[in-house]
Image (tube, helix red, strand yellow):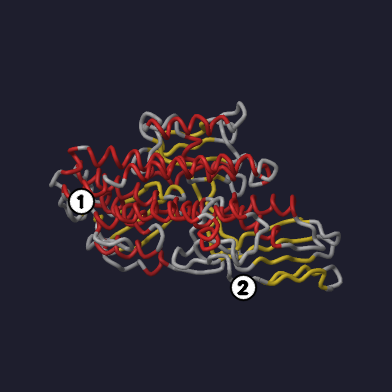
Amino acid sequence: MPTSTITINPVTRIEGHAKITIQLDEKGIAQDARFHVNEFRGFEKFCEGRVLWEMGGITSRICGICPTSHLVTSAKAGDAILSVTIPETAQALRRIITLAQWLQSHALSFFHLSSPDFLLGFDSDPAKRNIFGLIASDKEFAKRGIRLRKFGQEIIEVLGSRRIHTPWAVAGGVREPLEPAKRDYLLNWIPEAKETARLALDTLKKIHVKFEKDIPNYGNFRSLYVGLVAPDGALEYYDGTLRVMDGDGNIIADKVNPSDFHEYFGEATEEWSYLKFPYYKPLGYAKGMYRVGPLARVNICDYIDTPLAEAERKQFKALAGGASVVNNSFYYHYARLIEILFSVEKIEQLLQDPVTMGQNIRAKAMINQLHGIGASEAPRGTLFHDYTVTEDALLSRVDLVIATAQNNLAMNRTVRQLALQYLDGAKVTEGLLNRIEAGIRCFDPCLSCSTHAIGMMPLHVQVVGPENNVLCDVRR
């Protein structure tokens, strides 16, 4: 059957470079859609032959937005190779910097990248539908978001000496303790950060009402959910074990040691994308599609151990309408804001804990194992660093399983669902294109994490009919 194709290239207001293609039939009806990641990084290969001690500094360069997540996860893989339990103070400090990464990344996602759609409108002028347009429309709201992100970055800088690519976490612990004056400086930020988190949540609840007819179209389907939980089932972000839950709320695997990840999850590839396609092995590819990140974490945990975030989690669960799982990808935004509130509360608790101010911050050891896996919850989901080394600490194999890759099947499913709902093959509008891009932004994908578009990058979309005639031409 003759077909035509719509291409959205590049996808804007995401972290990295990608495009979307939508396949139409001869009637102009969407038949399929794909999310292509069209950049190649190659970190896994060029890390081979490097020394274990360098991996934190190298792998933090993977990502300009969440370098701390790679730094901490790399250090945890190093801990496993050294066969050490790091000091309590080092773990507390690693926990704080992990939450700071959540805070600054989630604030960027909601305030800078996604809220322009909600507050300025999906159909608004794309030249203004960005953080600068938001500043012009609501300066105080935009300023709040900028300062909330700054708070997260300040924590990272205070602990690690710089905001991006800090070399602070190392195999065995961390490099430097936290000074009392710096602890007090960070605590002074807490009241403002809490207030901004609550403002964002109140704003989002109004958005839910405003877009109640659109929300059901945003990746609303059952899938598996995967993430770390604490031993008692609480929301976890640094340690714990893996839990796998299905779209009906049934726990199908629990208390899985992250070091056994490869026994449960495989990685497929497709010729049309550089991004891998992880899947749950017992169900096979691609039936084993699963989601990670805020939506998964808030779905799978039994509770959140800070009071304000737990109260929000209970309201979040009410969105499931009697079911135990929220399956709509639009609510990634809600879960993300719950995690912001949790991060602020938990950072306050950890900064006030005397253990955090200890001086014993590093276990000393040499190579004791030739293989180690580190896992933690990055802002976008569970992150794995899998290292194999020689006795001289040289890397012979590196496997990095990135959160965005684990959402890859679900992102493609979301794009397909939106195309089927909104696409009129004879007419392409800015609103249509932006709604499809917004479906991807629900997941806050981090592709290269080194470049950003603010909504003004050039875009050329043509709808070509079965006879190769141009039905519609849109440029921006």
Q: Amino acid at mark 1?
A: Lys
**Tag in front: 2 or 1:** 1
Please indicate, yes or no, whether residue 362 appears anywhere in the rendered image: no
Q: Say which quadrant the N terminus sits in.
A: bottom right
Instruction: Determine which residue is flagged by label 1.
Output: 182
Element carrying mark 1: helix
Q: Amino acid at mark 2?
A: Pro
Q: Position of residue 135 (x, y in %)?
A: 50, 59
Quick one: 142 or 7, which is closer to the camera? 142
Tell which circle, 2 or 1, labels the residue nearer the N-terminal end. Answer: 1
Quarter of the image for residue 49 reads bottom left
58 left or right of 18 in image: left
Quarter of the image for residue 459 reads bottom right
Q: Tell me the crowding category of disc 2: few under 14, some 14 to 19, or many 20 or more residues within 10 angstroms, Cα based.
A: few
Q: Position of residue 422 (x, y in %)?
A: 74, 53
Q: Residue at point 18% right, 39% down?
A: 355
446 shown above or below 319: below
318 shown above or below 434: above
Q: Position of residue 427 (x, y in %)?
A: 79, 63
Quick one: 180 or 85, which is closer to the camera? 180
Which mark is on residue 223? none
Please indicate, yes or no, whether residue 66 appears anywhere in the rendered image: yes
Marks 2/1: CA–CA distance: 44 Å
404 left or right of 153 in image: right
340 shown above or below 400: above
Element carrying mark 2: loop
Quarter of the image for residue 208 reads top right
Quick one: 448 or 42, which is closer to the camera? 448
Q: Residue at point 74% right, 61% down?
A: 23
Q: Looking at the image, which residue sits at the far left?
A: 359
Which mark is on residue 458? 2
Q: Say which quadrant the C terminus sits in.
A: bottom right
